[in-house]
Amino acid sequence: MSTLTTAPPAPTGARALVKRLSLHLDTLPTGAAVVIFIGMIVYGEAAYGRIVQFNTLSNLLINNAHLIILTVGLTFVILTGGIDLSVGAVIAFSSVAGVMLMNAGWNPWIAMALMVLIGTAFGAASGVLVQYFHVQPFIATLAMMFLGRGLASILSTVPERLADDNPVRGLGTQIKLYDGPKVNDIAITPGVVIAAVVVAAAFFVLHRTRTGRTVYAIGGSEQSAALMGLPVVATKMWVYIISGSLAGLAAVVYTARLGSAQNITGIGWELDAIAAAVIGGTLLTGGAGFVLGSVVGALVLGLMNVLITRDGSIPPEATTIITGGILLVFVLLQRAVLARRRE
Amino acid sequence: MPESLPIVEMVGISIAFPGVKALDGVGLRLFPGEVHTLMGENGAGKSTLIKALTGVYKIDDGEIRIAGEPRRLGGTADAQHAGISTVYQEVNLCANLTIGENVMLGHEVRGAAGINWRATHRAAGATLAKLGLGHLDPRRPLATLPLALQQLVAISRSMVAECKVLILDEPTSSLDANEVEQLFTVIRGLRDQGVAILFVSHFLDQVYAISDRLTVLRNGRFEGEYRTSELERAQLIAKMIGKDLAVLKSLDAKESRRVRTDEAPLYAATGLGRKGAVEAVDIELHRGEVVGLAGLLGSGRTELARLIYGADRPDTGEVAVDGEPTEITTPAKALAHRIAFSSENRRDEGIVRDLTVRENLVLAVQARRGWARPLPRREQDAIVAKYVSALGVRPADPERPVRLLSGGNQQKVLLGRWLATDPEILILDEPTRGIDVGAKAEIQEYVADLADDGLAVLFISSEIEEVVRQSDRIVVLKDHRKIAELEGGPGVSAESIVTVIAEDGLGDPSADTAVREEATT
C-alpha cells in the first residue's frame, strides 16, 4: 500500500520471458505466427531446398512489398474494430489512372503523388460515411470498393503498359546489396524500402503516439474512449485515411514492379490483407494486435505461395483452401485467447 | 465551512428528449472543498444533469458557469479542459490496455521519441499509490482486475487530469464495504485539497457519511438544495419520492410467506459444480419461495446462478426439475424448463441498448418461439402494456430506445422480459444494483408478489440486508463454496450472516493460506 518509488528488479532469462508472456496474452497469436513462419521455412528447406537462400528471401520481400503496405493500413482500421474492403479496388483505380496519366505525358512524380492521393480520397470518403453518416464500415467500404472497381473499368479494360524508360519503373528495379555465387544475391527494390519505412512509421505511430494509443482504446471500447475525452471522431477518420493512402502507395509500388496496370488488378487483395493481419495476431473485434505481426502474416501468405510453387504437386487452385485453413487455425487460436482473457 | 464562491454554477438547465422533458429549469452549485450529493429516484434526471455538465448532452436552455465564466461545453474533452472529470457507474475503461495506460490515456508522458513508456508507467504508479493502490503493477492488463478495483483505477485516472471538479456517478455500486471506505478516504483527501466533488449514490448511509450538501431532483425538476446536517433521512426520502414512506415500511412489515418446504422441490441440484467457478453445491428451490444467495463480492454467487441456468456448463452434479432428472447445459434447455436468468451485467448481457422498450420486452418470448414465427404485433402490445404498467416503467413509452431510460427503468424492462416468458424459476442477479430506493422498493415488492403467485425465485444481491429482507431461505457462499443455509426469520439478520462468513474456516489452520486476493477471480 506504500508508494511505489522503485521499480521491481527486472527478472532475467527464461523466467522473464514466461512472465512477459503471461502478462501479454495478446502477443500469443503473433508469437504463433512467427513460429509458423519459421516452421514453414524449415519445412520448405527440408522438403524442397533452396529456401534459406538470399535470393529466395529477397524475392519474398520484393514480391510482397505491396501486400505488406496494404496490411499495415488494414491493421490500423481493424485495430479500431472497423474494416476496409475497398483497398484492392483502390489499387486498381489508382494504378490504371496513374499509368494512363503518365502515358498521356504527365510528370511521373506528380502522377505518383496523385496515385497516393486517390487512395487518400477514398479513405476519407469511407471515414466520412462511417463517422458522420453512421454507415457500417463493412457497407461503407464495400460501396467504395464497387466505386473504385467501376472507375478503373471505365478508364480502361485492357492492361495499360508503363513505358520502358519511365522513371517509376526504377522503384521496382532490383538493387544488389551483395553479389553472391550463382545469382544467390541479397537484393532489394526501392519498393521494399518504402514498405520498411511504412512499417517503421506505423509502429511508431501505434506504440509511441497518443493517436496510436487512441486507436487501441477505440478498439477496446469506443464508448469508454469517448468518455475518457479521447479524440475518437478524428482518430477514426484518420485510420480510414491512412488505410486508403497506403492502398494508393501500394498501387505505386506494385505498378512499378509489374510495369503495367489493369482494372482487374487487386481483386481479393483486401481479403489477403485482412487475412495477413488476422494471421499476424490482430483481433477482428479490435483493440489487440501488432503491426509487426501483420508483416509476419503477410510474409506467411507470401511464403505459402512460394512453397506451393516449389512443391509442384499442389494445384495452384488449392492455394486459397490452404490460406483459408491457416486463417481458420489462427481465428480459433484467437478465440481461445479471448476466452482465457474473459476468465 | 466558510461560504466561498461556487466553482460550478448551473442555472435553469432544461433538456428535452423527443417526447419528454428530462430536465426542467434545474440548478446546481458546486463549491470547492465540498462533497455535494445529487439525490433523486431513477429517471429524476440525475444522469441527464451530469451529462449536461460533462458536455455529453447539449442543454436547450439555461447556463453553466465555471469559476464565474459562462461556458459552452461541446463534449467530454471540453469538460476535461475546464477541469471537470467524471467517473461513471459502469466502468468506462479499456480492458484491452494495461492498468497504467488506462490511468494515463491522453496524458502520457512524451519525450523526443514519442511516448516514454517508462516515465508514463512511473507516473501511473505514483497516481495509483495516492489512492492506496500502489500494489498494482501498472504494466498488467486492466482485465486482470476485478470490477471494484477497476473502478478505483478509473478514479485514479481522473486525478491525473488535475481536476477541479470530480463527478462520481454511483461509484460505489459495485464496491464492497472495505473498498467503499478506501474510496471515501480518497474523496475526503481530494475534498481537503479543494476539489469540488459531485457524488451520486443510492446508499443513504454513504450519502450521509460523505456529503456536505445535497441537491434533490424529482421528475426532472429541482426539489431543493440542503445542507446534509440539516436534512433528516426520512425527509430526504419523502422529498425524493414525493410521498411518505408507507411503501417501504409495508414491505418490511410483510409477514413471511408460508412456504411448504416439505413439498417436493421444483428444482433440486446435488453436487452442482464447475472447476474454477463453484465447488459442488446442493441447492433446492420450491414453488412460492424466494431463496437468497448471500456472500461477498467474488464468493461465487453469479457463478452458481450461471450454472443453474446453464450459461456455464456444470462439470459435476445432478439436477432434477419437478422430480425429473435432467441436464441443463445450455440456456436454451433452461428456458425449456422455464428457468429465466436476469444477469447482473445489465449493459453487456442484459438490455439491447438500441432496441426499443417493446422490442426488449418481447425479446425472450420471441427467442423461445424461434425467429421464423414472429410474434404478432397484438400480442407484443399486450405483453408491453402488461409489464410497463405492472412494473411502472417510466417513461411509459414503448417505442423509446432503452438506452434513453435510466438504470432502474432498464432493470424493470429486463425483469419484464423474463417474466414475459412465464417462468417457473426466476434467477435475479443483482436486480437492484444502482437503483434508487423508490424503484428498489417497487422491484422488491414485485418479487415478493411473484413468489406469492407460486414462482420459485433465486435472489442475488451484494446488499446482505436486502437478501435477508427478501428471502425465505438464504444460501451463504464463501470462496466459491456453500458454507451455510439459513431459514429466514427473526433470528437471521445481516449481522448474523456476516458472522457466519467471518467465522467460517476459523480454527482450520489451512484456511489462512486459502485467503486470496480477489484479484485472482
Image (spheres, coloured by chain):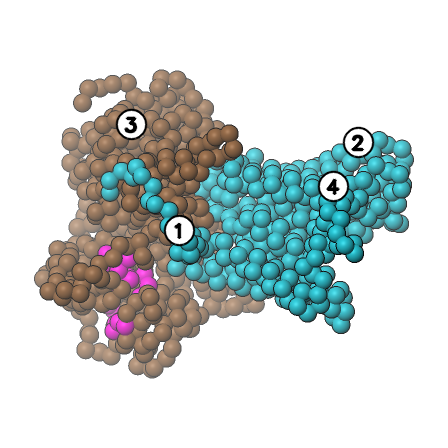
Find the distance from the CA under tag 2 to the CA under tag 4.
Answer: 18 Å
Image location of residue B181, percent across then percent down: 21, 42
Please give the letter of the chain rendered in cyan. A
Query: Which residue in the structure is indicated by mark 3?
Result: B195
Does mark 2 fall on the same chain as mark 3? no
The secondary element bearing badge 3 is classed as: loop
| Chain letter for the residue marked with disc 2 in the picture | A
Query: Which residue in the structure is indicated by mark 4?
Result: A190
Find the distance from the CA under tag 1 to the CA under tag 4.
Answer: 40 Å
| Chain letter for the residue marked with disc 3 in the picture | B
The answer to whether the residues at label 2 and label 4 have Cβ atoms under 8 Å apart is no
Image location of residue A81, percent across then percent down: 55, 48
Residue type at numbered disc 4: Pro
Q: Residue furthest front?
A: A181
Find the distance from the CA under tag 4 to the CA under tag 3.
Answer: 57 Å
| Chain letter for the residue marked with disc 4 in the picture | A
Does mark 4 fall on the same chain as mark 1? yes
The first of marks 2 and 1 along the sequence is 1
Query: Is B146 in front, or is B490?
Result: B146
Image location of residue B236, percent across then percent down: 21, 37
Residue A87 at least partly seen: no
The secondary element bearing badge 2 is classed as: helix
Residue type at numbered disc 1: Thr
In the rendered structure, find residue A12 and report the number of the disc placed on it. Answer: 1
The residue carrying pointer 2 sits among few (fewer than 14), some (14 to 19) or many (20 or more) residues within 10 Å by Cα, namely few
The answer to whether the residues at label 4 and label 3 have Cβ atoms under 8 Å apart is no
| Chain letter for the residue marked with disc 1 in the picture | A
Find the distance from the CA under tag 2 to the CA under tag 1.
Answer: 53 Å
Query: Is B411 in front, or is A37?
Result: A37
The answer to whether the residues at label 1 and label 3 have Cβ atoms under 8 Å apart is no
The secondary element bearing badge 4 is classed as: helix
Query: Is B279 in front, or is B67?
Result: B279
